[in-house]
Image (tube, rainbow, N blue to C red):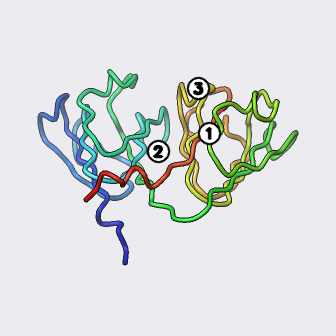
Amino acid sequence: MSFRWLLQIIFYEDRNFQGRSYETSSDCPELTSYLSRCNSCRVESGCFMVYDRSNFQGNQYFVRRGEYGDYQRMGMSDSVRSCRMIPMHKGQFRMQVYERENFGGQMHEMMDDCDSIQERYRMSDCQSCNVMEGHWLMYEQPHFRGRQMYVRPGEYRNLREMGNSSVNRYTSMRRVLDSCESQHH
């Protein structure tokens, strides 16, 4: 049985859920096709990444069930332009992180959250990774702080050239767990 239909996010043109709205349960590369701008959202269920540029580019923000009445208070400089649904993952999580781009330098395999690659692995930076299982959030600063990037199964040869070019390095990683669905009836 597929639970994909349970995931839902509603975008609003204005802050505090005002103005026209658009709801979706899937990836949307260009929200301005539906709304002239997007300044708030309500996540009914599931987990999503929202982006301040079209085609899943720019600054990324993880949102889960709840209300987000003002994106600028979240640190976004502009309105949301695109969103990506994060599918539920059952099973193990596995990712190899590399110190340098193109899978160079030290490599460590992770199966759980890491709040600091400097403390755990003595690595100053993660510039490439191979996600074998699960969905992950990469953070610019230790202890899951700063700008973030969503990665799903696949090879990422140069994290600096991905959607959020203003991030110079990633130093902590967290699994996207099904707990984002735990509040759903």
Tag 1 or tag 3, which sits nearer the N-term? Answer: 3
In percent of width and height, residue 118 lies at 76, 28
Q: Residues within 10 Å of mark 1 (few under 14, many from 20)?
A: many
In percent of width and height, residue 87 lies at 45, 59
In percent of width and height, residue 91 lies at 57, 65
Closer-to-camera residue (123/11):
123
Question: Quick check: 104 left or right of 38?
Answer: right
Q: On the image, numbered disc 3 is attached to which residue?
A: 166
Q: How many marks?
A: 3
Most extreme residue toward the right is 105
Q: Residues within 10 Å of mark 2 (few under 14, many from 20)?
A: many
Q: On the image, numbered disc 1 is attached to which residue?
A: 173
Closer-to-camera residue (77/133):
133
Closest to the camera, between mark 2 and mark 1, is 1
Q: CA distance from mark 3 to mark 1?
A: 18 Å
Question: Quick check: 150 left or right of 65?
Answer: right
Residue at (72%, 47%) from the top-left corner?
Answer: 129
- Where's the N terminus, which quadrant? bottom left
Which of the 4 quarters of the picture holds residue 125? top right
Closest to the camera, between mark 3 and mark 1, is 1
Q: On the image, numbered disc 2 is attached to which residue?
A: 56
Confirm or deny contact between disc 2 and disc 1 (CB under 8 A). Answer: no
Closer-to-camera residue (115/62):
115
Residue type for callout 3 = Ser
Q: Residues within 10 Å of mark 3 (few under 14, many from 20)?
A: few
Residue type for callout 2 = Phe
Most extreme residue toward the bottom is 1
